[in-house]
Image: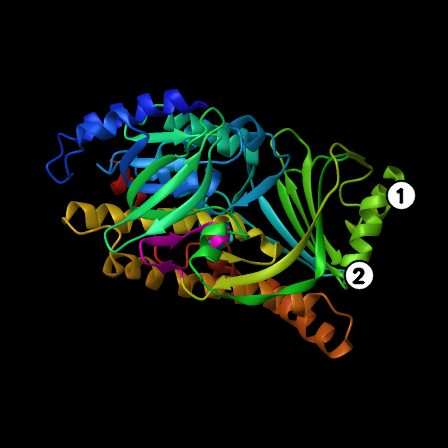
C-alpha cells in the first residue's frame, strides 16, 4: 500500500472495519470508534520491513483485520542499498504469496556455488544437479523485495498501513493490547486495539525489551563490511563463499552484472578497510577474492556493522509474538539471516490462519506456543551452523586448519555430503510452511 498520512489511514481503517463487520467471527465495532482515534484490529504488525510485510501479505485473504505500523517513510525503507541471499524455500514462499513473478526477473539465480579456504588450492563447486533442482538459490536487492511486497499490499483491502507512524506505548491485557501510535499530523496518539501484537521491529526490538524477554548470545570479535562492486569479468551467476583466517567473504551475483560483497573481519581491520582510499580497498578485495572477477570498481558506499549471534529466550509473551531479527540474529556467513525471518513470517501466518478458521483466539498462549515450538528449534540449528562455520574457518590454528580442509575435501568428493549441506542451506531440510494454502 502506498504511503498514507493519518487521515487516509483512518479512512482506510474505517473501510476495513466495515468490510469485516460482516464476518460473524468478528465482534461488532461500536459506532463511536468510527469517528474517534481508536481503531480495532485482530492483528497489529509493528515493523513494515521485508519480514513484517511478508507476514502482512500472507494474511491478506485470511479474514483477519491487520494493521501494519512502520516508523520510517516507505521511500526511506526502500532506498537501502543492500542485497540478500534468498534460499529455495524463501523463493517458494514468495511464489505462494503471489509476488514471485514480479521479483524473479530482477533477481539472480545461482548456477553454481563455490566454497574455498584462503590459500588452499581445493575449491568445492556445488551445482543444481547436486540437489536435483533448477537452481541453488537467489540474490535479490532490498529494494526489489520490499517494492514487490508493498505493491501487493495495495490490493489487500483487509490490510491497513500506517506509515510513517511511531509506536509510543503498548498496554497488554488478558484479552488484547492497546497500542498508542503517533503520526506526524496528530498531536494526540491514535489508540489501536488488537488481539495480538507482532514485533517485527528489528534486532533492537523495543517491543521485546518492553515485554521483558531476555536474549541469549554474544557479540563476535568481527564486523561486516558490505558494498556493491562492478567486476571486470562476468560473475556467471556464481555465488562465492571464500574463507580467510580473519573471517569469511561472500560475493553475491546481482541481476545487473554487479556483485554484492559481504566481508567479515575483526573490528579494527573492518574500520581500516572502510576508511581506506578506494583504490587500496579494491586492491585488498581483489586479493581476497583470488582475482576470480578481475579488476573491480566500487559502486556504493562501504557500510559497516558489528556481527552478533542472538536468540530470544522466548518467541512469545502474553499477546505478543516475535519474528525476524526481533527474535534472533546470526552470523552473515552462508546468508541465512533474512531467510530465517521469512520462514518465521510464513510459519506464523499458517498457524494464525488455522487458528482463526477454527474459531480460536489468535492471541492465546495455546496458539502462540505452536509458533514457538515450530520456529525456535529450527532457528537454533541455523544459528549453531553459522557459528560453527565462522569459528571453524576464522582461525589459523594449524590443527583446525587441517580438519576443515579435510572436511572440504570430503564435501567435494562425497555426493551425499553435498546434498545434506545444500538441503540445510536452501531451507529444504525443515518443516515447510504451506503458504499457497494460506493466501488462497
The residue carrying pointer 2 sits among few (fewer than 14), some (14 to 19) or many (20 or more) residues within 10 Å by Cα, namely: few
Residue shown at 40% from the left, 51% from the top: 344
Residue shown at 35% from the left, 47% from the top: 197
Q: Residue tagged by mark 2?
A: 119
Secondary element under disc 1, as helix, strand or loop, is: helix
Q: Position of residue 320 (x, y in %)?
A: 35, 53
The residue carrying pointer 1 sits among few (fewer than 14), some (14 to 19) or many (20 or more) residues within 10 Å by Cα, namely: few
Magenta residues span 315-327
The magenta stretch spans residue 300: no
**Mark carried by residue 185:** none
Cβ atoms under marks 2 and 1 closer than 8 Å: no
Q: Which of marks 2 and 1 is nearer the N terminus?
A: 2
Q: Position of residue 69 (x, y in %)?
A: 42, 36
- 158 above or below 410? above
Q: Could you give the CA–CA distance between mark 2 and mark 1, rounded to whole angstroms?
A: 21 Å
Q: Residue tagged by mark 1?
A: 280
Secondary element under disc 2, as helix, strand or loop, is: loop
The magenta stretch spans residue 322: yes
Task: Name the outermost residue toward the front.
Answer: 187
Res 270 visible? yes
Amino acid at each position: 500500500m502506498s504511503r498514507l498520512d493519518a487521515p487516509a489511514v483512518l479512512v482506510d481503517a474505517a473501510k476495513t472495519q466495515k468490510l469485516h463487520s460482516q464476518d460473524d467471527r468478528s465482534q461488532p465495532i461500536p459506532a463511536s470508534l468510527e469517528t474517534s482515534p481508536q481503531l480495532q484490529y485482530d492483528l497489529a504488525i509493528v515493523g513494515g520491513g521485508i519480514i513484517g510485510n511478508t507476514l502482512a501479505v500472507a494474511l491478506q485473504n485470511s479474514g483477519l483485520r491487520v494493521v501494519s505500523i512502520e516508523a520510517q517513510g516507505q521511500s526511506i525503507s526502500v532506498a537501502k542499498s543492500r542485497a540478500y541471499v534468498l534460499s529455495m524455500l524463501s523463493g517458494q514462499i514468495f511464489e505462494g504469496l503471489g509476488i514471485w513473478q514480479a521479483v524473479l526477473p530482477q533477481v539472480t539465480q545461482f548456477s553454481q556455488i563455490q566454497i574455498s579456504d584462503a590459500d588452499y588450492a581445493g575449491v568445492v563447486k556445488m551445482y543444481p544437479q547436486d540437489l536435483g533442482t533448477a537452481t541453488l538459490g537467489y540474490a535479490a536487492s532490498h529494494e526489489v523485495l520490499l517494492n514487490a511486497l508493498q505493491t501487493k499490499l495495495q490490493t489487500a483491502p483487509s490490510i491497513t498501513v500506517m506509515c510513517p507512524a511511531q509506536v509510543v506505548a503498548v498496554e497488554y491485557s488478558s484479552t488484547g493490547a492497546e497500542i498508542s501510535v503517533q503520526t506526524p499530523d496528530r498531536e494526540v496518539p491514535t489508540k489501536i486495539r488488537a488481539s495480538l501484537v507482532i514485533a517485527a521491529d528489528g534486532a533492537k526490538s523495543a517491543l521485546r525489551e518492553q515485554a521483558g524477554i531476555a536474549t541469549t548470545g554474544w557479540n563476535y570479535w568481527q564486523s561486516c563490511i558490505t558494498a556493491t562492486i562492478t567486476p571486470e569479468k562476468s560473475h556467471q551467476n556464481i555465488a562465492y563463499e571464500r574463507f580467510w583466517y580473519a573471517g569469511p567473504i561472500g560475493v553475491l551475483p546481482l541481476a545487473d552484472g554487479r556483485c554484492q560483497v559481504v566481508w567479515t573481519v575483526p573490528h579494527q581491520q573492518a574500520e581500516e578497510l572502510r576508511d581506506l582510499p578506494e583504490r587500496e580497498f579494491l586492491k585488498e578485495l581483489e586479493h581476497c577474492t583470488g582475482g576470480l572477477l578481475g579488476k573491480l570498481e566500487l559502486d556504493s558506499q562501504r557500510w559497516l556493522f558489528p556481527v552478533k549471534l542472538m536468540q530470544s529466550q522466548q518467541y512469545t509473551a502474553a499477546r505478543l509474538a516475535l519474528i525476524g531479527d526481533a527474535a534472533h540474529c546470526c552470523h552473515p556467513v552462508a546468508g541465512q539471516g533474512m531467510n530465517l525471518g521469512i520462514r518465521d513470517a510464513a510459519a506464523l501466518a499458517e498457524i494464525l490462519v488455522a487458528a482463526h478458521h477454527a474459531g480460536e483466539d489468535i492471541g492465546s498462549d495455546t496458539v502462540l506456543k505452536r509458533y514457538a515450538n515450530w520456529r525456535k528449534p529450527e532457528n537454533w540449528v541455523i544459528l549453531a551452523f553459522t557459528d560453527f562455520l565462522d569459528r571453524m574457518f576464522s582461525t589459523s590454528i594449524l590443527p583446525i586448519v587441517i580438519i576443515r580442509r579435510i572436511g572440504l575435501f570430503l564435501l567435494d568428493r562425497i555426493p551425499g555430503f553435498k546434498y545434506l549441506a545444500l538441503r540445510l542451506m536452501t531451507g529444504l531440510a525443515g518443516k515447510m510452511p504451506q503458504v499457497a494454502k494460506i493466501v488462497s
